[in-house]
Amino acid sequence: MLKASSRAKELVRQILTFSRRADRERRTLQADEVIGEALRLMKASLPKDICIEPRMQAQGCAILADPTQLHQIVMNLCTNAAQAMRGGGRMDVRTQVVCLGEEAPAHAHGLPPGQYLSLTVEDTGPGIAPEVLGRIFDPFFTTKDSGEGTGLGLAVVHGIVSSLGGSVFAESEPGCGARLTVLLPTAQACPSPPPAPLSDHPKGHERILLVDDETELLDLVRQTLEPLGYQVAAHNLPEAALTEFLASPQAFDLVLTDQSMPRLSGLQLAARLREVRPDLPIVLCTGLSMVIPPDRLQALGEAWLLSKPFSTSELARVVRQALSNTRGGCDAA
């Protein structure tokens, strides 16, 4: 559940930043593990008359990529295959490690010789007509009826694969199904550190003014901070939080506030608090950092951004950074 939630968070963030061509953070991934995870999610959304037959033969193979991008590749390839089998069928998903040498057809795919992860998705649908085969990766090209597809799925796959230094190609004959293959360069495997247990998260004893108009989130964050040693005063009304603060401005060491709130936004609340305590550390929580104009954030002074949804580790780290005043204007998004 945590992995799925994290992938969803990253997918939403990628959708929001897609038009800006923002660079994604790449790391060493165990390919079969991430692909298998995507397939398990995919099975839940497929019609019952479509069977996925995975054959994962790239155990131990590592690639350098963003995990959400690899998820997108798998989900789009599988969705494309499923849509080709309207009456049901079988989808074979295979992974293996291949070596492209000087004599191999590497140059046909624009790839230099070397070792690659091969991901193949093959369906038992009607196949792709020759006059269509060369256009399937074009943006907005689709053979589906109006309202049934955007024509962007395979174009997104092509864009991601190209950015990772790989290649994607299709093979098909009418009446014999279609086979799409992705080749991605392998990388040196690096073990991923296990998630830090709660006892390893940064702790403190300071007093925190917590503000969020969503009661459930307010309680969740409070229940996360208190076991770490912090004293938390929680308010779901920003006006009430402001009143308590003005009554005793030195009673709090940090303010953690949601940005999007009715009547008084996080930025507005922060500005009011800073009029009284210019040195007050403030952490702004937001689902969209783009809604905070950079000039307004800069005018606020020392402030930290924390993107929703956040993990216990992220919350503990940013709160500790803000209290320690290690660096200003830090963006933890």
Image: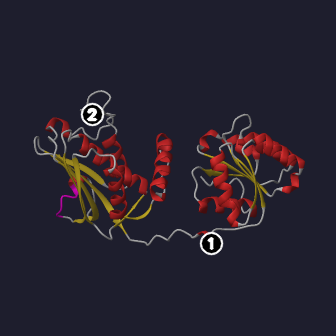
| Circle 1: residue type | Ser
Residue 80 percent coordinates (x, y): 27, 43
Residue 191: name its quadrant.
bottom left
Q: Is residue 318 visible?
A: no
Residue 299: name its quadrant.
top right
Residue position for label 2: 142
Numbered disc 1: secondary structure: helix
Residue 97 percent coordinates (x, y): 25, 66
Numbered disc 2: secondary structure: loop
| Circle 2: residue type | Thr
| 303 or 239: nearer the viewer | 239
**Mark 2 residue crowding within 10 angstroms, few (<14) / some (14–19) / many (20+):** some
Residue 294 percent coordinates (x, y): 67, 42
At 18% across and 58% down in the image, what residue appears?
Answer: 105
Magenta-colored stretch includes residue 105 = yes
Which residue is situated farthest in the right direction here? 247
Residue position for label 1: 199
Residue 142 percent coordinates (x, y): 27, 33
* Left or right of 109 on screen, residue 221: right
Q: Magenta stretch: dominant SS?
A: loop
At 29% across and 44% down in the image, what residue appears?
Answer: 79
User: Which residue range is magenta in the image?
Assistant: 103-107
Magenta-colored stretch includes residue 257 = no
